[in-house]
Amino acid sequence: MTVDELLDPLFLEVTDPALRDLRTLREDLAVTPTPLQPLDRLRDHLGGGPRLWVKRDDLTGLALGGNKTRKLEYLLADARAQRADVLVTVGAGQSNHARQTAAAAARAGLEAVLVLRVPQDATPEYRTSGNILLDRALGAEVVLVEESADDPHPELAAADAVVAQLRADGLRPYLIPTGGSTAIGALGYVESYAEIVAAGTAFTEIVFANGSAGTQAGLLAGRELLADSDRPRIHGVAVSPEADELAAAATAIATETLAFFGRELSEPAVVDDEHAGPAYGALTSGAIEAIRLFGRTEGILLDPVYTGKAAAALLHRIRSGAYTGDEDVLFLHTGGAPALFAHAPALTAAFTA
């Protein structure tokens, strides 16, 4: 079946007309379906194991691609329905979501304000390169706020102040939370799950990075909605130490997304907490090895913040015998390569050691 044949009947079940129309009205931002490719050279390098595949959501096409583009298609439709003229979002300084939000706003003819937190000890490369450079190239207003021990997420209050000022100026801001991770945003990953089903390979497990829970929520909801399909394990990998919070958020968002369709979640999200490292954005030896292996066997670029850590989890599971040689395992590549440049000094040292 095609993606439309899988999803169109489901959206007819939505009782709220505004939500039911979101799939029809969603902004055309992403190049989909994204490629599904075998990772045969990586598998050979590892000496066998399960058949490995990658779904290339790093190739969604908008401003160097990434998974947030799928969410933004639905979020932008909701923003237009609310007659918004400014998109405001939050995140870490090197947020891939912020970059894609800036690009989505440019495509839609809207303004964008990005409120981004940076560590006090951030390098000049972190503050000016990678995604921050691209945000500015895309025309977004970038507001950088400093993290502190007392306030590790200063971007949240700062964004509320930005929204209040925009409203006072007579504008209509649409505030998108971290990662676009809402029930509406998760619809983009219901759609991605339908693409996986339509491809026809019965995967045992889907492995991916979980930074703000929305991608995992959408995949969980998609698996529930497409009940006649095979039920792969949805293996989210935490990119920060707050795995329990990420699992709870993914469960809550998936539950809310399924409620649009009158469905319920049958099992809660589970998030792998073994590969995050000591903090969000902290370089880990596992991520560095994964970046090197994917690059040098498959010509695929991972990043040190998200996909490198998720791929480290995949490599660990293969080496520990979590899969048999007769299984198909999918790595969902959620993008993020611009962050390589923001971490250039440390990565250069690792790759040339």
Image (cartoon, helix red, strand yellow):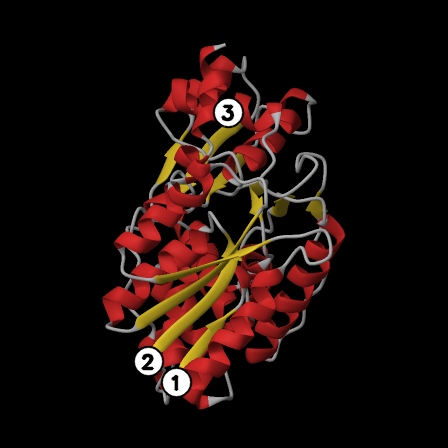
Which residue does the image show at 53% across and 76% down from the upper left? Answer: 161
Residue at 72 percent of width and 35 percent of height: 274
Q: Is residue 67 left or right of residue 32?
A: right
In the image, what residue type sits under mark 3? Ala
Q: Is residue 50 left or right of residue 7?
A: right
Check disc 1 and give the amino acid type: Arg
How far across and down, in percent of the image, does residue 90 sit? Answer: 50, 62
To which residue does mark 2 refer? Answer: 85
Question: Alpha-carbon distance for marks 2 and 1?
Answer: 5 Å
Q: How many marks?
A: 3
Q: Secondary structure at mark 3?
A: helix
Whether label 2 touches label 1, CB < 8 Å: yes
Circles 3, 1 touching at the beta carbon (< 8 Å): no
Q: Is residue 296 above or below residue 280?
A: above
Q: Nearer the viewer, mark 2 or mark 3?
A: 3
Query: Quadrant of the image for the N terminus?
Result: bottom left
Does 158 appear above or below 138?
below
The residue pinned by badge 1 equals 172
Q: Say which residue appears at 42% left-offset and 33% top-offset.
A: 340
The one nearer the camera, 165 or 75, is: 165
- Relative side of 295 to 158, left or right: left
The residue lying toward the viewer, choosing from 132 and 192, is 132
Q: Which residue was labeled with disc 3?
A: 346
Mark 2 or mark 3, which has the lower sequence index? 2
Mark closest to the chain's N terminus, 2 or 1: 2
**Res 291 visible:** yes
Disc with the residue nearer the chain's start (3 vs 1): 1
- Residue 225 figure quarter: bottom right
Q: Give how far apart the Cα atoms at labels 2 and 3 are.
A: 40 Å
State the CA–CA distance, disc 3 to disc 1.
41 Å
